[in-house]
Image (cartoon, grey):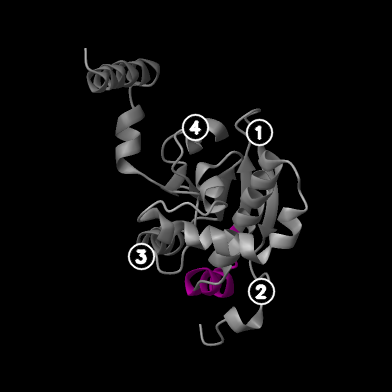
Amino acid sequence: MEKYEKLLLENKAWAAEKVQEDPDYFNRLAHIQRPDFLWIGCSDSRVPANEITGTEPGEIFVHRNIANMVVHTDLNLLSVLEYAVNHLKVQHVIVCGHYGCGGVKAAMTQHNLGIINKWLRNIKDVYRIHRDEINLINDNEKRSDRLVELNVCEQVMNLAKTSIIQAAWKKEQRPHLHGWVYGLKDGLLNTVIEMPPGTHIDEIYEYDDL
């Protein structure tokens, strides 16, 4: 049996189990999606949003990319953000990184990785800004883990810089922004930054005509 065929069989078993537990499960999911949370996470398959938070499908709206980035030119991310904030009316936006992130580790090297160089440059900028702090850490693993935390903080700040978030803050006092880091070794989420609605950021990024 091919590996992909096993996935299809597992899907049938999972669907049958869900219906056995709750005959109306899929009918209910098909007709409603009212998540309170937007999750911006890493593409790493070891960090599935629903499983590590114990939530069901429909409870978290999910966007994932390499190293959980919020890049101001990423129309994919911005489209997800606008839909989640303005149409789904989410109350919380979570940026979740994870310790041991391969994207962060790659950004700390000088290796040429092709097209991904352009993406990793955003993480290199975070490293450059915090270079003095990071370079004081002697252990390589702890150094990259600290950059993971600082990167999450920077991406939450990037969310706060968007007109999407600022307009929702001004008009509806939502959403709350959270920066978390997931531990692959213990399965626990660690809070590294919180930004409640209306948090003041550098005034150069704050729009005065929303």
User: How many numbered circles are shown?
Assistant: 4
The three-letter amino acid code for the residue at tag 2 is: Ile
Specify the farthest residue to the top.
Answer: 1
Disc 2 element: loop
Measure the alpha-carbon separation of dots 3 and 4: 25 Å
Residue 209, above or below 157? below
What numbered label is drawn on residue 46?
Answer: 4
Q: Which residue is mark 3?
A: 75
Viewer-side residue, 149 vs 92: 149
Residue at numbered disc 1 = 188
Count neighbours of disc 2 (C-alpha within 10 A) and say few if under 14, some if 14 to 19, many if 20 or more. few
Q: Which mark is residue 45?
A: none
Real-space CA distance between mark 3 and mark 2, rounded to the nearest whole angstrom: 23 Å
Q: Secondary structure at mark 3?
A: helix
Which amino acid does the dot numbered 4 rest on?
Arg
Give the Cα separation between the discs numbered 4 and 1.
Answer: 13 Å
Mark toward the start of the polypeptide (3 vs 1)? 3
Per the rendering, the mark at residue 201 is 2
Secondary structure at badge 4 equals: loop
Q: Residue at x 50, y 47 (%)?
A: 103
Task: Kindly identify the residue that appears in the image at 38 percent across and 46 percent down.
Answer: 33
Residue 158's spot in the image, x, y percent?
A: 55, 66
166 drawn magenta: yes
